[in-house]
Image (cartoon, grey):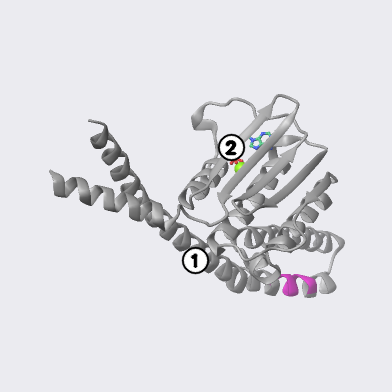
Amino acid sequence: MPSKSVAKRHMVAVANSGSAELSRHLLKAEEEERRRISRELHDETGQALMVLRFHLEMLAGDASSREQEAKVQESLEVLDRTIEGLRRIIARLSPRVLEELGLLSAIRRQAQLLGSHTKMKARLELPDKLESIDHDIEVALFRSVQEALHNIAKHSQARSFAIRLHISGEKILLEVEDDGVGLLTRSPHERGFGLTGMRERAVALGGSMTIQSRRDKGTVVRVAFPAGGEPSRTSVDKAARAVRRVAKAS
Ligand SMILES: Nc1ncnc2c1ncn2[C@@H]1O[C@H](COP(=O)(O)OP(=O)(O)O)[C@@H](O)[C@H]1O
Ligand SMILES: [Mg+2]
């Protein structure tokens, strides 16, 4: 009976809306956890490394032989690279830069960082200013830019990349494109969690993520959200009413 299959679809919609709520909750918990880890790395590990650095510098001044001095200098260099690496980990973990600068400047900053590390050319198409968008979606957009740029640095061998953010009445669309080697087909167990995580985050917030890529023609990652955020309340309410109607009738 057609009405039954409609009811079935609605029931699935209601069930999905529950799991979307749960996923949103889990995303929040994950962000909170990342923030805590980043704070601890900053306050504890970071501080301890700075103390070590201070002591090593003192030792460098007091070295009694050339050999000793060379060893201390070498240790200082290793330590500086470690501190630099830790800073990058902290920056990736915490969206503090997003909270401090806002989405547009945070995206610009990420692009600058990649440009200065790799000498890749960056092209940005961002709106002049942002109307208020859902905070969870903002975090998801920022995380997607971070992951896509990280992938470009790690895998693409590109010469340039572009970040586009278009916001219309109905849709928020983010595109991150590079002109590199393109996505190679890999067996599932070789795949990382970056792209999968990006897709799951988008879907949890009512959006989608797609990838377009050709060998040696680069890669485009697109993340889209309805401008209103999650699937509208009215469609969830309608589905709930339909399920109640079917339950009453049977
Ligand atoms: N911009 C890109 N250019 C080329 N290959 C890419 C790009 N982005 C992702 N890939 C490929 O897709 C795979 C999966 O990416 P991801 O899920 O982020 O995992 P990871 O980066 O941890 O390997 C990568 O291992 C890489 O082979
Ligand atoms: Mg990755």
Q: Is residue 174 visible?
A: yes
Query: Looking at the image, is mark 2 or mark 1 nearer the viewer?
Result: 2
Looking at the rendered image, the quarter that the N terminus falls into is: top left
Q: Position of residue 113 (x, y in %)?
A: 78, 55
Among the two numbered marks 2 and 1 on one chain, the one whose residue lies closer to the N terminus: 1
Judge whether 62 appears above or below 161 on screen: below
Q: Residue at x 47, y 57 (%)?
A: 27
Specify the principal SS of the magenta part: helix
Give residue 58's quadrant in the image. Answer: bottom right
What amino acid is found at the position of numbered circle 1 in the picture?
Glu
For label 2, the residue is 210
Which image quadrant is residue 104 in? bottom right
On the image, the x and y values in percent for residue 78 come to 74, 57
Q: Determine whether, in the image, residue 231 is placed left or right of residue 142.
A: left
- Residue 5 in magenta stretch: no
| Frontmost residue, 208 versus 41 | 208
Looking at the picture, tell me which residue is in the foreground, 61 or 111.
111
Is label 1 in a helix, a strand or a loop?
helix
CB contact under 8 Å: marks 2 and 1: no
Q: Which residue is mark 1?
A: 32
Q: Specify whether residue 53 is painted magenta.
A: yes
Quarter of the figure that contains the C terminus: top left
* Picture residue at 68% right of the left edge, 71% below the top: 100
Place of residue 88 in the rendered image (x, y in percent of width and height, measured from the top left):
68, 58
Mark 2 residue type: Thr
User: Regarding mark 2 in the picture, which secondary structure is present there?
Assistant: strand
- Which quarter of the picture shows residue 156? top right
97 in relation to 243, above or below: below
- Specify whether 11 is left or right of 133: left
Magenta region, residue range: 52-57
